[in-house]
């Protein structure tokens, strides 16, 4: 009887030892939990929904609209004169003079349009540069409030949706999707809406500052 009890105890001890060994092995091979204080922000969404940006963009477009319309009027007039040229006889002095004039005017319009477009693009870029600085400041402030030590830019739309709204999903290439740095993130760390709310709460003051800067 004692021999049976001792044998049973030995079997139990061996079983426990094996079980503990398995647990230890599993613990050693299991990946350690990753802890990170990271927040993500969709800058594209903020740029499209932030009243400060839209107000400055509208002001810029209104400022340049008359200039572009004047260029279009010159181009329309050039087209009318080109129609007159078609009624004239090639080789005559009047034809040659008008043709040379039209060529010169066409080059002038192209030059002026290029310069005007460049000025517009530079000022539009300045708007986004200023806006990005604001976003960065508010992102840093909010990150400190929640204890995050890093803020990553993401596209919070569907992973197969293009950054360019004019490009359909079918036109996206595999390279575009694979090139995205963030594959997945927990929605709880997306602080885009919170930052957008903070930014829009001061939109009027920022808009007034922007108008003052633009008019200088």
Image (tube, rainbow, N blue to C red):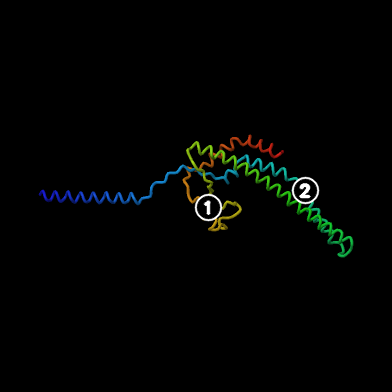
x and y percent of residue 11 in the render? 19, 51
| Residue 127 relative to residue 178: left or right | right
x and y percent of residue 56 in the render? 66, 41
Q: Which mark is residue 46?
A: none
Task: Find numbered disc 1 in the image and state the secondary structure of the residue it sits on.
Answer: loop
Task: Find numbered disc 2 in the image and state the secondary structure of the residue it sits on.
Answer: helix
Q: Which tag is nearer the camera, tag 1 or tag 2? A: 1
Picture mark count? 2
Which is nearer the eye, 211 or 162? 211
**Going 70% across and 44% down the picture, which residue do you hit?**
61
Q: Name the residue under label 2.
A: 70
Within-10-Å neighbours for mark 2: few <14, some 14–19, many 20+:
few
**Going 35% across and 52% down the picture, which residue do you hit?**
29
x and y percent of residue 181 in the render? 51, 51
Measured in 3D between alpha carbons, the distance from the residue under mark 1 to the one under mark 2, in whole angstroms, is 43 Å
* Residue 208 versus residue 29 in the image, above or below: above
Q: Mark 1 and 2 residues: CB-CB less than 8 Å, in contact? A: no
**Going 73% across and 52% down the picture, which residue do you hit?**
114
Within-10-Å neighbours for mark 1: few <14, some 14–19, many 20+:
few
> Which image quadrant for residue 48?
top right
In the orientation shown, which residue stands out farthest toward the right?
Answer: 93
Q: Mark 1 points at which residue?
A: 180
Say which quadrant the C terminus sits in. Answer: top right
In the orientation shown, which residue stands out farthest toward the bottom?
Answer: 91
| Residue 22 relative to residue 192: left or right | left
> Which image quadrant for residue 168?
bottom right
Which is nearer the eye, 191 or 128? 128
Q: Earlier in the sequence, mark 1 or mark 2?
A: 2
| Residue 160 relative to residue 54: left or right | left
x and y percent of residue 178 in the render? 51, 55
**Going 71% across and 47% down the picture, which residue do you hit?**
119
């Amino acid at each position: 009887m004692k021999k049976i009890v001792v044998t049973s105890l030995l079997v139990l001890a061996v079983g426990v030892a094996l079980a503990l060994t398995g647990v230890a092995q599993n613990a050693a091979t299991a990946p350690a939990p990753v802890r990170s204080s990271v927040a993500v922000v969709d800058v594209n969404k903020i740029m499209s929904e932030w009243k400060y940006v839209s107000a400055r963009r509208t002001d810029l477009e209104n400022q340049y609209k008359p200039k572009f319309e004047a260029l279009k009027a010159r181009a329309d007039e050039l087209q009318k004169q080109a129609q007159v040229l078609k009624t004239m006889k090639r080789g005559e002095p009047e034809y040659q003079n008008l043709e040379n004039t039209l060529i010169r005017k066409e080059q002038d319009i192209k030059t002026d349009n290029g310069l005007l477009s460049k000025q517009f693009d530079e000022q539009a870029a300045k708007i986004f540069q200023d806006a990005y600085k604001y976003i960065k400041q508010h992102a840093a402030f909010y990150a400190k409030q929640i204890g995050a030590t890093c803020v990553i830019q993401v596209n919070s739309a569907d992973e197969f949706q293009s950054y360019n709204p004019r490009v359909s999903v079918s036109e996206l290439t595999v390279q575009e999707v694979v090139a995205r740095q963030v594959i997945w993130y927990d929605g709880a760390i997306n602080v885009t809406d919170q930052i957008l709310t903070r930014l829009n709460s001061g939109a009027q003051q920022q808009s007034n500052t922007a108008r003052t800067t633009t008019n200088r």
